[in-house]
Image (spheres, rainbow, N blue to C red):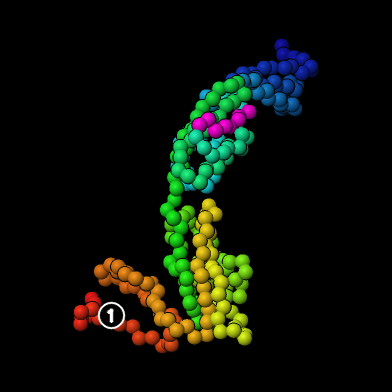
Amino acid sequence: MKRSHSVSDQKTRLRSGGRWILLVLAVFGFAGCDDFVMYEPFQAPEAPGPLAIEPTAALVKAKQAKEFSASGGSGDYAFELFAGSGTIGSSTGIYQAPNDATEATIEVTDAAGVSTQALVFVTVPPELFLNRTSVTLELDDDFQFEASGGVPPYEYAIADGSENIGTIEDPAEGLFVATPDLDGVTSVSGSVEVTDDVGTQVTAEVTVTENPAEVWLEPEGTVKVPENETKDFRAYGGSSPYDFGFAPEDGELLP
């Protein structure tokens, strides 16, 4: 006896890997699946973790900024300066350090009133220096200004009102070239300035003349050179060419 099949579609539910699948089959001839619908099970959102602040401690140089961030908790974070000095953006979490060394506590609070804190230690960087506070150069001479201390990186520039003394070839490098217009004068003076990353600034006076009388060396003073290493010296002023040699001391040559 032949087995008959209903011509109406039948719906079969299969459970596989935690998913319910509604499968509609055309049973006559098992022609295949015309419709295939997959339903994802409902998943509750993951609960947020406890309120946290990053970093929990930070070393910041005076006058610099440091950004703090929050996570977890109930969101809608508000930052404030709990103790110490400096300022912080309530919504941004950006702390601005004062000019002096200090300690501070940053607090962040979420929408549920839960708070957590971070510590800030503000240090004062070493004083900013230039290798020369004043130089006298001949027309078309160049001189390498070098900054130290402060907070690198440094930016070198011709001071406002001193544009006629020459140019800084690269603001990041400090090479000065004396290219003034000496028409009708024998010398011009001005300033070169260097600014560090937190805005501290020092200047050097520059004089450019046709015939500088004084001869001077760069670097100046006592220079220590490690064994088997070399050190370049450069002469300025006077009348070139120059002759370099060891200076006599008590009738002997310095080693």
- Whether the magenta-drawn stretch holds residue 168 is answered as no
Q: Is residue 2 above or below residue 88?
A: above
Q: Which quadrant does the N terminus fall into?
A: top right
Dominant secondary structure of the residues highlighted in magenta in the image:
strand
Q: Residue at x 51, y 70 (%)?
A: 205
| Whether residue 201 is visible | yes
In the rendered image, the residue lying farthest to the right is 7
Q: Nearer the viewer, residue 38 or 252?
A: 252
Relative placement, left or right, of 203 versus 225 is right
Q: Residue at x 23, y 76 (%)?
A: 255
Residue 225 at x, y percent in the picture? 30, 69
Q: Is residue 197 above or below residue 221?
A: above
Q: Nearer the viewer, residue 239 or 146?
A: 239
Q: Residue at x 50, y 46 (%)?
A: 99
Per the image, the residue denoted by label 1 is 247
Residue 116 at x, y percent in the picture? 51, 27
In the rendered image, the residue lying farthest to the top is 1
The kind of residue on which mark 1 rests is: Ala
Local crowd size for mark 1, using a 10 Å CA cut-off: few (<14), some (14–19), many (≥20): few
* Helix, strand or loop status at disc 1: loop
Relative placement, left or right, of 156 versus 184 is left
Residue 46 at x, y percent in the picture? 58, 23
| Whether residue 46 is visible | no
- Whether the magenta-drawn stretch holds residue 78 is answered as yes
Residue 184's quadrant in the figure? bottom right
Relative placement, left or right, of 37 versus 228 is right
Residue 39's quadrant in the figure? top right
User: Range of the magenta residues?
Assistant: 76-83
Residue 109 at x, y percent in the picture? 57, 26
